[in-house]
Amino acid sequence: MAKWGMVFDLRRCIGCNACAVACKQENSLPDGVFFTKTLSEEVGEYPDVTRSYVPTICNHCEDAPCERACPTGATYTRPDGIVMVDRNKCIGCGTCIVACPYDQRTRLEPEMLKEGLFGGGRMTPFEEQGIGRFTVGTVVKCTFCHERVDAGQLPACVATCPTEARIFGDLDDPTSRPRQLILERRGRQPLPEKNTNPRVFYID
Amino acid sequence: MIASNRIADGTFRVGVGLQKAWGVQMATAFFFGEAGAGLYFVAQFFDFTLGMFAGLVMVLFGKAGGHILHLGQPLRGWRALTKVRSSWVSRGLAAIVLFVVAGALHLIDLRAGVLPAGVSQLVAALALAACFVIMIYQGFAMSHSTAIALWSGGLMPIASLTYALLNGVLLTLVLGFDAPFLAERPDTVRLLQVLAVALMLYGLVTVLSLLHGARHASEAGRQSVALLLQGGFARWFVPLVIGVGFVFSALMMLAAPPDFAWMLAVAGLELAGYYAFRVLMFKAGSYDPALSLAYRFRH
């Protein structure tokens, strides 16, 4: 069984946020909800200043604190390592949100699902067909586009990234590209001091 | 300068992010939980039925009500009982259910004497044990969240217990002012007053230690403490939590004459400080930047 993971190449990321747009489109995410973001950060002091970009996503931690904290068992880890939320079990208590060190979970508030992204106080037909996958008051997060992955495709953000800054694959396979990149370029996990063992790595 | 030192709330920038999942409703539930459980806990030692009843009602309606208002799917709330082995929220809910059932039975038994002696003692002990869990589990639920440096200190459960006992002592002094166990026993009143002052001092040191620990734990902890002591929340935190909640109420208690209005004022001030503590600890809770590794990598 594969253990899916992702590598972010910070040298390649140009901060275009095409990943965030692709994610919103793929998952029909309502206004204010992002499963992935590319954050920017200025580094240095004038005149030696540069801007770097930091893609963020649910890290699908091996020791997921959200899963441990969840009082209903709604958050669970699939055998392939993808951390999921069962919307039929989630009670929307927000415990997982405050347990996630990466701030990668969002509770769906009623107002989020009332208006579409394009104004006029209503949704487009495209938005309406996607909204059915959500339940108001429950928590949502990135699932590595599990339907696509199950069908042998790449997550939407990975498929869309124009610079191949996102590399997805099986972390248990020594020959997989993400695994090799982690080894060759000393991939690092975000906030390792939290002891969550994320399946997302950053290389620079 | 690096941009990650700033609070980047809701923006596409690297920085500390404020938590928004738990807010006033949750703070209100926590407030009633610790005030009600503390009151029941202290009142049960004196078999003070009015205090026990008031504590039970506060937990049942205030705490449970606050949680129900907070939940996104309240009708599924019972599901929170299913992960007692790993989740402090589950353990807390189990304690609330046990407390309400055992506490109500114990109160009925005190009035009507319906239970055999052995069972009666067992029910009273169960109610007290569940009550104790409610007094501390909120602290554990918060400190379990290593994501938020302000909460993750080991002192959070101690702060919960201290506040709960303090609330219990003060509310007992108010509600039981005319009750025989206080009205006819001035030494008991004095003992509870001394206990209240001691708990206020202990609570003050605990809260300051919490802040001290958070300040040196991480960037987010530093920002949270700065928000509470110097930033946007300082105008509430310093005067209400520290000033009114501990210092002023302790001084008033030390100088307290045997007067109901005075006791009520002290309890009111302390409870106001405690409520402010609960709300502001949630408001100021913040996440570390997921990655200022970009900066660390390059330098």
Image (cartoon, grey):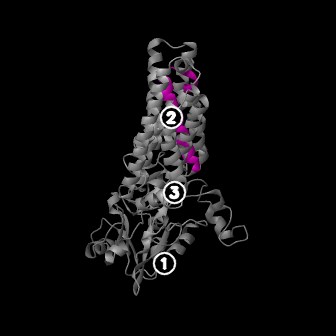
Q: Residues within 10 Å of mark 2 (few under 14, many from 20)?
A: many
Q: Chain of mark 2?
A: B
Q: Nearer the viewer, residue A110 or B22?
A: B22
Measured as percent of width and height from the top left, residue B131 is found at 47, 31
User: Which type of secondary structure does the marked residue at label 2 adopt?
Assistant: helix
Mark 1 residue type: Thr
Mark 3 residue type: Ala
Residue drawn at (41%, 42%) of the image:
B157
Q: Quadrant of the C terminus of chain A?
A: bottom left
Residue B288 appearing in the image: yes
Q: Chain of mark 3?
A: B
Callout 2 and callout 1 share a chain: no
> Circle 1 sits on which residue?
A160
Measured as percent of width and height from the top left, residue B10 is found at 53, 67
Q: Is residue B228 above or below residue B15?
A: above
Magenta segment: B24-53
Measured as percent of width and height from the top left, residue B170 is found at 52, 32
Q: Nearer the viewer, residue B160 or A9?
A: B160
Q: Is residue B103 left or right of residue A180?
A: right
Callout 2 and callout 3 share a chain: yes
> Circle 2 sits on which residue?
B253
- Choose mark 2 or mark 1, whichever is in front: 2
Residue A64 appearing in the image: no
Marks 3 and 1, Cα distance to the nearest angstrom?
A: 45 Å
Callout 3 and callout 1 share a chain: no
Q: Are marks 2 and 3 in contact (CB under 8 Å)?
A: no
Magenta segment includes A133: no
